[in-house]
Image (cartoon, rainbow, N blue to C red):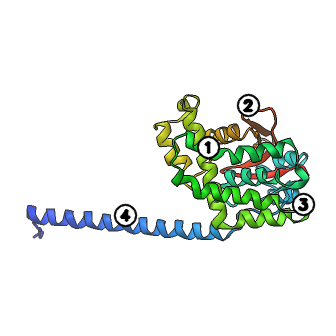
Amino acid sequence: MEKREFYSSEGKEEAKVKDEGKIQEDIQELIEKNTEYENALKNEIIKEIPISRKEPFKGLVIQYEGNKYYEGLKKINASFNFIRHSRRDGNCFYRSYLIQLFEFLNPKNAGPESLKVEKKLTESKDFLLSAKYEELAIEDSYLALTQAIDQLKKLTPDKFEDGLIDLVSNAATSNYLLFFLRLITSAYIKKNAELFMNFIVDDTVDGYCQREVEHFDHDCDHIQILALTSYMEAGVIVHTPREDGTVETMKFPDEAKEYPVSMLYLPGHYDPIYKN
């Protein structure tokens, strides 16, 4: 005779609770493992140098031989001979733009463009104050910026590259500098909200700035590039190799008189590139 087992409603409920508890434990374990992986990945990224010295662009082309971006990179290499590699940490655009701005302060580059860059940077504190930022909240970052400018201006051309790399590689200083560029970007977006609001999805202008712009290590999007380059009046041309072997070039902003900064864009990452 077949043996049957009967469960009371209380027993079924107890089994259900146990199953749900096991599911929650499994989910928590997955979350913890994912967090451990993300932390390990962040630690590996931090070990990378923030930005390299200039290296031959051809080296990057060789690395991509056989890759879908190879032909496009070869075309870019026909115009650009050198590249700096910026750390992949969410700040790559800001770091790449910062180092190219600072290169104008090299005595051998003295001229109207270097004076304009220095003027825009030193006037940025007043710009932030006009956007309702509290002086107490920005003074440390602004002090780091002015000290960096003074430090670079004292360097001779033959010492400039070493001094620049040391400055941008110093985490205590460079984090302040990168954050200050983010504040400038955020302030420009807020002061020109009508220009950007239609491009911000599912958020307010203030919410976007707080969540995406002022949040350190968040990737820079086109809105931020347009805002920062517009404030600095130093346009950038971004060169992107495509899978079909072509190269897309985008100018930020469209109406800039000059584009003194050039960058390479590969999926999710920006690096500064140079003709000489």
- Specify the amino acid type for callout 2: Asp
| Image x and y of residue 83, in percent | 82, 56
Residue 253 occupies quadrant? top right
The residue beneath circle 3 is: 157
**Cα distance in 3D space between marks 1 and 4:** 49 Å
- Going from N to C along the chain, the mark reached first, 2 or 3, is 3
- Specify the amino acid type for callout 3: Pro
Q: Nearer the viewer, mark 4 or mark 3?
A: 3
The residue beneath circle 1 is: 126
- Specify the amino acid type for callout 1: Asp
Q: Nearer the viewer, mark 3 or mark 1?
A: 1
**Structural crowding at the residue carrying mark 3, measured as other residues with C-alpha within 10 Å and reported as few (<14), some (14–19) or many (≥20):** some
- Specify the amino acid type for callout 4: Ile
| Image x and y of residue 267, in percent | 68, 49
Q: Is residue 33 above or below residue 266?
A: below
In which quadrant is the N terminus drawn? bottom left
Closest to the observer: 129 or 95? Answer: 129
- Residue 254's disc is 2
| Image x and y of residue 224, in percent | 62, 42
- Residue 27's disc is 4
- Going from N to C along the chain, the mark reached first, 2 or 4, is 4
